[in-house]
Amino acid sequence: MGKETIRLASGYEIPVLGLGTAWLHGKEGIKAITWALELGYRHFDTAYYYGNHAEIRKAVKSSGIDRSEIFLTSKIWKDNLEYEQVMKQADKIMEQLGLDYVDLLLVHWPSDTGVPIKETLSAFEELVDKGMTRSIGVSNFRIHILEEALDTANIPLCINQVRYNPLRQNWAKRGHIPFCLNQGMAVTAYTPLAEGDILGNRILWEIGAEKEKSVVQVTLRWLLQKGVIAIPGSSNRQHLEENMDIFDWELTREEMKKIDNIPQIQSKS
């Protein structure tokens, strides 16, 4: 269940379905992460900025599941992208998670203070050398800065994580997602369910009714068939379980095209 994977440019594999944990905090957060582990989720996405590494640590530890079975992503915040800042925040991340390494470490956002991407990536590469992360990547990087990062990096940048769902396809329509895939970078979609906005979409409802699947399942299946990793978030056990029912059926080419052409919500991202 939920163990289908994509091989990253680093050689490691990442499950194509994960749990986004940005809004999971406290006892309710621990409960949701614990449920996900019980249901078979093995990919968890977090970040220093989310402030929930402790919740993930507690849920994983109490699960008894071996660390080697779990793929864990965290991110360095955009205000800490100077070399020494990256190294210090990485140490804090490991301390908070109670781990020696994460599977994937991302630059959460491009620097808005002019820190050269070369400086940031030099720190990331050292973290790989130290065994503190197995793979590295970025998040919210558009093509122009991504090109600079790719030219600068001495090891593969494995992933670009972006906001992507049927109602907000700007990253694809402007060529960002095809660019990444053509460069050998995987793409992860955060907010793949448009924070619930997809639930009112007639096209998704009609396709779901035809398939006897939910709107959420149709959306996640669409992403998988696009070759995109999805990290929906939920604190509802039933929803967590339903989200996993996306692997033994397919959308037709016509259904995919209908979703591709859904009218878009205006968004800057």
Image: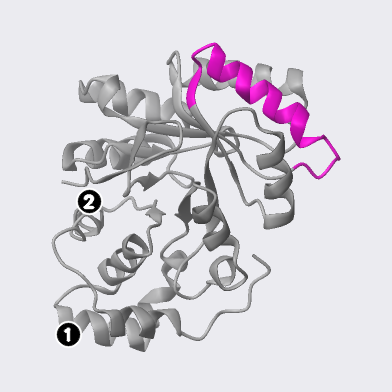
Res 7 quadrant in image: top left
Residue drawn at point x = 29 percent, y = 38 percent: 31
Looking at the rendered structure, the secondary structure element under dot 2 is helix
Dot 1 crowding, Cα within 10 Å, few <14, some 14–19, many 20+:
few
In percent of width and height, residue 257 lies at: 37, 82
In percent of width and height, residue 216 lies at: 30, 68
Res 51 quadrant in image: top right
Boundaries of the magenta span: 111-134
The residue lying toward the viewer, choosing from 228 and 26, is: 228
Q: Amino acid at mark 1?
A: Glu
Dot 2 crowding, Cα within 10 Å, few <14, some 14–19, many 20+:
some
Kindly identify which residue carries mark 1.
210
In percent of width and height, residue 141 lies at: 65, 51
Residue drawn at point x = 34 percent, y = 24 percent: 58
Kindly identify which residue carries mark 2.
237
- Is 111 positioned to the left or the right of 60 in the image? right
Mark with earlier residue (1, 2): 1
Residue drawn at point x = 75 percent, y = 21 percent: 83
Q: Nearer the viewer, mark 1 or mark 2?
A: 1
Magenta residue check for 152: no
Q: Amino acid at mark 2?
A: Arg
For the residues bearing labels 1 and 2, Cβ distance under 8 angstroms: no
* Rendered view: 195 above or below 252: above
Res 76 quadrant in image: top right
Alpha-carbon span between mark 1 and mark 2? 25 Å
